[in-house]
Image (tube, rainbow, N blue to C red):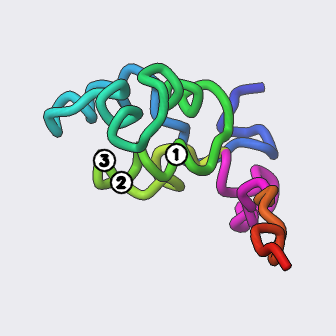
C-alpha cells in the first residue's frame, strides 16, 4: 500500500528540517540567532525541528513568515479527519496572587 492510499495520509507533508533552516537563511537569520533573540540558549530552538513545541514553532514560523500549521501540518491537523487539532502551551507555574505578600 502506498502512502497516498493510507487512511492516515496527510495531503501535505511537514517541511524537512533542512528546508526550514534554508528558509531561515534566506531571511538572513539562523536558528541560533532566533533562539538568542527570544532569550533562549542558542541551541534550544532546534528542538522544534524534531518534536512538537508550540512556542518554538511559533518563533520559527514568525521568522520565516509562514504559518506554523503550513510548516508542520502533522502537528496541527488530525491525520484521519483532517480537522484542526487544538494545541495548548503548557500551563504556567505562576499562581494568581502568589507574588503578593500580606
Q: Position of residue 97 (x, y in %)?
A: 81, 77
Name the side, left or right, on which 30 lies relative to 1. Answer: left
Do the numbered discs 2 and 3 sit on residues whose CB atoms are within 8 Å? yes
Q: Nearer the viewer, residue 64 or 10?
A: 64
- Dot label at residue 62: 2
Name the side, left or right, on which 33 lies relative to 88. Answer: left
Q: Residue at x 73, y 60 (%)?
A: 87
Q: Residue at x 76, y 50 (%)?
A: 79
Q: Quadrant of residue 4?
A: top right
Task: Assign a secondary structure to mark 2.
Answer: helix
Magenta-highlighted stretch: main secondary structure?
A: loop
Q: Does residue 84 show up magenta in the picture? A: yes
C-alpha separation, residue under disc 1 versus residue under disc 2: 8 Å
Q: Position of residue 48 (x, y in %)?
A: 57, 33
Q: Nearer the viewer, residue 26 or 80?
A: 26
Q: Earlier in the sequence, mark 1 or mark 2?
A: 1
Q: Position of residue 57 (x, y in %)?
A: 52, 45
- Residue labelled with disc 1: 57
Do the numbered discs 3 and 1 sit on residues whose CB atoms are within 8 Å? no
- Dot label at residue 63: 3
What's drawn in magenta, residue-wise? 75-90
Q: Position of residue 102 (x, y in %)?
A: 85, 79
Q: Residue at x 29, y 54 (%)?
A: 65
C-alpha separation, residue under disc 2 versus residue under disc 3: 4 Å
Crowd tier of the residue under label 2, counting other residues whose Cα lies within 10 Å: few below 14, some 14–19, many 20 or above:
few
Tally of numbered discs: 3
Q: Reply above or below: 14 against 30.
A: below
Q: Quadrant of residue 47?
A: top right
Q: Quadrant of the N terminus?
A: top right
Q: Reply above or below: 48 against 84.
A: above
Q: Residue at x 76, y 68 (%)?
A: 99
Name the side, left or right, on which 65 lies relative to 4. Answer: left
Amino acid at each position: 500500500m502506498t502512502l497516498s492510499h493510507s487512511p492516515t495520509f496527510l495531503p501535505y507533508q511537514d517541511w524537512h528540517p533542512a528546508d526550514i533552516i534554508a528558509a531561515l537563511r534566506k531571511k538572513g537569520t539562523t536558528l541560533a540567532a532566533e533562539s538568542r533573540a527570544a532569550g533562549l540558549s542558542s541551541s534550544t530552538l532546534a528542538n522544534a525541528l524534531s518534536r512538537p513545541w508550540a512556542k518554538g514553532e511559533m518563533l520559527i514560523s514568525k521568522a520565516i513568515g509562514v504559518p506554523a500549521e503550513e510548516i508542520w501540518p502533522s502537528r496541527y491537523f488530525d491525520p484521519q479527519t483532517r480537522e484542526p487539532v487544538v494545541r495548548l502551551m503548557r500551563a504556567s507555574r505562576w499562581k494568581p496572587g502568589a507574588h503578593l505578600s500580606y
